[in-house]
Amino acid sequence: MKKVSFYFFSGTGNSKAVVNWFSEEAKNHNIETNSIDISKLEKRKGEKPLPKDIIGFCSPTHGFNFPPIMMHFIFRFPRSTGNKAFIMNTRAGMKIGKLFVPGLSGIALWLAALVLILKGYKIIGLRSIDLPSNWISLHPGMKENVVQSIFERRKKDVHQFAKTIISGKKSYKAFRDIIQDLLITPISLGYYMVGRFVFAKSFIASHKCTHCNLCIKQCPVNAIKLVDNRCFWTHKCESCMHCMNICPTRAIETAHGFVIGVAFIFYTIILTWLYSIIGLNEIFETFLSPAMHYLTEVIFHAILFIFSLLSFYYVMHFLMHFKVFERFFVLTSLTTYKFWRRYLPHKAK
Ligand SMILES: Cc1cc2nc3c(=O)[nH]c(=O)nc-3n(C[C@H](O)[C@H](O)[C@H](O)COP(=O)(O)O)c2cc1C
């Protein structure tokens, strides 16, 4: 083995830490490593690897899959010249008491492996690493000591995995989870289509925003722009949580109240109106079998909900100019309260 070239994406630093730990171990064995942050590549397409190089991929898991930026990168990655490759995903690990609880990978590793195999790569390692969950739109960030203890434990796992790969052996520990991973495939696919649009349309910047533009400058996918001098999250947002965690004034919030409010309006007013006025049910029943009726309804509702959220997001963005509405949207965001910690792994490492 001559060199390990790592391609990684990392929202809040977990996957980057994994790449660094792997590289430390490689260095101990005098093996050169090259770590490339794919969000910083100008053209998101890797270089054609030299035949003896080993290629590593590492990314967080988002919605039981790799985030779109990583999947698109792998889809566009050059064909192999006889290379070996390994794939690592970091997942939402938790610690309950003394128990370390793993996250769920879904199709993240399997889809990536399939694409790479079709491109001629030989997969020599598949490994999930359970680092602290950074999904602070859903739950408060973990306490520093918990983050620290998860990090210490997983660092050893990564060094062990690196030793195995560097010594020329194979490691497929991820196979232990394959049944649960495949069972949640429908949710993985659903999230890929729907989840990212919903989460991207839940971020707001409160009055605490000092216009330092750090979030705009550092967004890995350039998803935040200024609209009417206020931060606006476009659909490109991967919900990687980078912006929320680096904001020096804690001005970025997940507008829970807004999302719940739109869902309420959508199901009680918009859908009811569509079904009763347009007679949507009769149209569906006339043209579709019961199974197709159900499937069409699920897809139709999802698309319509995203469309409503998108429209209302513009309305909220406008209303945020008025103090009374700004206060309302911020105070109905759970992330605004002190107990809802941010995720700051760099403090623990
Ligand atoms: C939008 C989003 C979706 C997530 N989905 C999953 C998931 O499906 N399964 C899982 O185990 N962890 C999930 N997580 C947790 C992250 O994968 C995990 O914390 C990861 O280590 C973060 O890596 P990073 O710091 O490199 O971005 C999710 C996190 C976010 C922000």
Image (cartoon, helix red, strand yellow):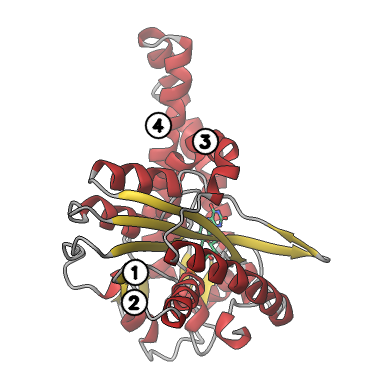
Pinpoint residue 326: horizontal percent, then vertical percent. Answer: 51, 75
**For mark 2, what is the residue?**
33
Label 1 to label 2, Cα distance in Å? 7 Å
Label 3 to label 2, Cα distance in Å? 33 Å
Q: Nearer the viewer, residue 240 or 117?
A: 117
**For mark 3, what is the residue?**
182
**Is disc 1 in contact with disc 3, using a CB cutoff of under 8 Å?**
no
In the image, residue 277 above or below residue 313? above
**Is disc 1 in contact with disc 2, using a CB cutoff of under 8 Å?**
yes
In the image, residue 197 above or below residue 232? above
**For mark 4, what is the residue?**
300
- Amino acid type of disc 1? Phe
Nearer the observer: mark 1 or 3; the answer is 1
Q: Earlier in the sequence, mark 1 or mark 2?
A: 1
Write down the quadrant of residue 221 in the picture: bottom left
Asked if the beta carbon under badge 2 is closer than 8 A to the nearest atom of ligand 1, the reply is: no
